[in-house]
Image: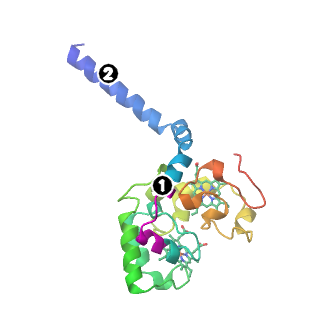
Amino acid sequence: MNKGLMITAALMLAAGSYYFAAADDDYGERYDRYMPRHAAAREMQPDTPEKALYKKECGSCHMAYQAELLPKRSWEKMMTTLADHFGTDATLDPADEATIGTYLADNAADVRPGERHLAKIAASLSPDAPMQMTKSYYFVKEHRSIPARLITQPEVKSLANCNACHQNADAGDYGERGIRIPNYGRWDD
Ligand code: HEC
Ligand code: HEC
C-alpha cells in the first residue's frame, strides 16, 4: 500500500470508530452524568420577557414544554390552531400569540438544537400527530413499559404531564435519575 492510501485508510478507521462510539448507548449514559449541570446552568440564566410570557400563557394547563421538543413547522401549526387546541380553546391576545409564536419558532428543535433527548423526540414525530411529542416514535418507545394505571392515576392523568414524573422537567432535564412516579417511586429498568 502506498503512503497516501495508508493515511486514507487510517483516517477512515478513525472516523468509523468515532461513529460507533457516538452510536453506542454507553456514550449516552456517560453524557447523562453531565446533564444536570447543563440544565442548572441553563436555568440560572434569567428568562427573557418572551420566554416568561410563554411560560405564563402556555404553562397554565400543563407545563410549558421546552421549545426544543418540537420542530418549527409543528409550533407554527399549533399557533394557528389554538382555537381548537386538543379539545380546548387556548387562544390568547393576538399580540401575545405573535410574541410566543416567534419565541417558539426561534428556539425550535431544528433552529436551535437542544439537549440530545429533546432532539430525539422532535426528530421522531409521527406524521399523523405532528404537534404531539407524546406520539413520537422515541417517546413511545421510552414510555411503553410504564403500566397504564400509573399514567391514568389522578396525580399524573396523562403522559403529556411530564413534570408529574420527571422532577427536573421544568429545567429540561429528563434523565432517569430525576424520575419519581407518584405512588411508585424511582424507576429501575
Ligand atoms: C386551556 C388549557 C390549555 C392551554 C392554555 C394550553 N394548552 Fe396545550 N394542551 C392542552 C390540553 C388539554 C392538551 C392535551 C393534553 C393531553 O393529551 O393529556 C394539550 C397539549 C399540548 C401539546 C401536546 C402534548 C403532547 O405531546 O401530547 C403541546 C405541545 C401544547 N399543548 C402546547 C401548548 C402551547 C404552545 C400553548 C400556549 C400557546 C398551550 N399548549 C396552551 C391544554 C392547554
Ligand atoms: C408516568 C410518568 C411519566 C410521564 C408523565 C412522562 N415520563 Fe418520561 N419517562 C418516564 C419513565 C419511567 C422513563 C424511563 C423509561 C425506561 O427507561 O424504561 C422515562 C423516560 C423519558 C426519557 C428518556 C430519558 C433517558 O435518560 O433515557 C425522556 C426524554 C422523557 N421520558 C421525556 C418525557 C417528556 C418530554 C414527557 C412529557 C411530554 C414525559 N417524559 C412524561 C416516566 C414518565
Query: Within the magenta stretch, is there residue 10?
Result: no
Residue at x 51%, y 60% (from the top left corner): 136
Nearer to the camera, 118 or 102:
102
Q: Kindly state the secondary structure of the residue where label 2 is placed.
A: helix
- The residue that mark 2 highlights is 10
**Res 148 visible:** yes
Quarter of the figure with the C terminus: top right
Name the main secondary structure of what is drawn in magenta: helix
Give how far across and how far down residue 16 sits, in percent.
38, 30
Closer to the chain start, of discs 1 and 2, is: 2
Magenta segment = 42-54
Compared to residue 23, the image places residue 125 above or below, namely below
Name the mark on residue 31.
Answer: none
Q: Quadrant of residue 112?
A: bottom left
Q: Residues within 10 Å of mark 1 (few under 14, many from 20)?
A: few
Q: Type of residue at label 1?
A: Arg
- The residue that mark 1 highlights is 42
Give how far across and how far down residue 118 sits, in percent.
49, 55
Give how far across and how far down residue 139 sits, in percent.
56, 57
Nearer to the camera, 120 or 48:
48
Q: Type of residue at label 2?
A: Ala
Q: Residues within 10 Å of mark 2 (few under 14, many from 20)?
A: few
Q: Which label sits in the foreground, 1 or 2?
A: 1
Queried on whether the Cβ of the residue with tag 1 lies below 8 angstroms from ligand 2, the answer reads no
Q: Kindly state the secondary structure of the residue where label 1 is placed.
A: helix
Residue 136 placement, left or right of 1: right
Distance, label 1 to label 2, CA atoms, is: 39 Å
